[in-house]
Image (spheres, helix red, strand yellow):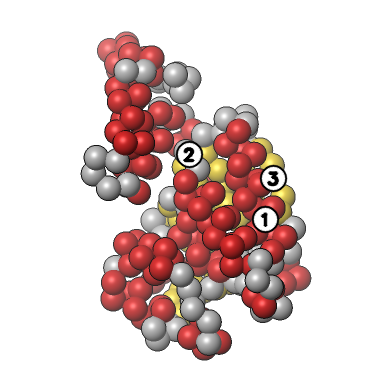
Amino acid sequence: MIRLGWETDEVAHITLDRPRRRNALDVQACTDLRAATEEVVAAGARSVVLRGSGGHFCSGADLAAVEDPAFTPALQAALQALAQAPLLVVAALEGACMGGGVQLALAADVRVVSTDARLSVPAARLGLAVDGWTARRLAAVAGAGEAAALLLAAAEIDGARAHAIGLAQRIGTPADAVAWALEAAALAPLTVQAHKLALACPDGDPEAEAARAAAWRSADLREGRAAFAERRPPRFTGR
């Protein structure tokens, strides 16, 4: 249900591949998603595109799966694997992006949304409730008012609205998401890692400070300066 592929040696694809269910999530899908994310990190990817198959991103949790006590921990582990991966995660949103699909989108760093996308968190229509991480992340990305509309009023928005409120950073297709990931793969990996931690961690966090210090003493910093002086593209190595 999860396919892992490579655009280049540095750009990976993770695809939710359950098109008959509009890529609905169950325990196995969440477990495989976490494993795929860990695999691309271990392989040295610099960016990854997260998308769905069959014209839909993810219709949320399979309702039969949410009754399994293992589902919520498996979903949370997948979300944290994406959110904490030391690379750029680009979500390509199209078609249905509901419930758990919105959670996956929030776990990405940036989002490209198609005009046909429909986003919602229908938990209040089902008697479910999302976790605090999801609520806070949604408010941080889209604003408190928009988060309230999606969570408390179970609002549905289209791709244009998602872009307008900042939930998506670009309007485009999955191919546009791949193009963005390719662009990002040329950037300095240690800087990307340091900035991702800086966005997620409080001031003075030891891990974030260590990552920032590593970027400042890296060979990539010297390469970036040399490339600028020589008016050529830099060749970053992540060291």
Residue 145 horizontal side relative to residue 1, left or right: left
Name the mark nearer the viewer: 3 or 1. Answer: 1
- Using the image, determine if residue 209 lies above or below residue 151: above
Q: Are marks 1 and 2 in contact (CB under 8 Å)?
A: no
The reply to whether discs 3 and 1 touch (Cβ–Cβ < 8 Å) is no
Q: Label 3's element?
A: strand
Which residue type does callout 2 highlight? Leu
Q: Is residue 61 visible?
A: yes
Dot 2 falls on a residue whose secondary structure is loop
- Secondary structure beneath dot 1 equals helix
Three-letter amino acid code at the position of disc 3: Leu
Mark sitting on residue 31: 1
User: In the image shown, does 192 or 168 lie closer to the viewer?
Assistant: 192
Q: Is residue 174 above or below residue 223?
A: below
Q: Position of residue 174 (x, y in %)?
A: 57, 53
Find disc 3 in the rendering and name its residue.
4
Give how far apart the Cα atoms at labels 3 and 1 are.
13 Å
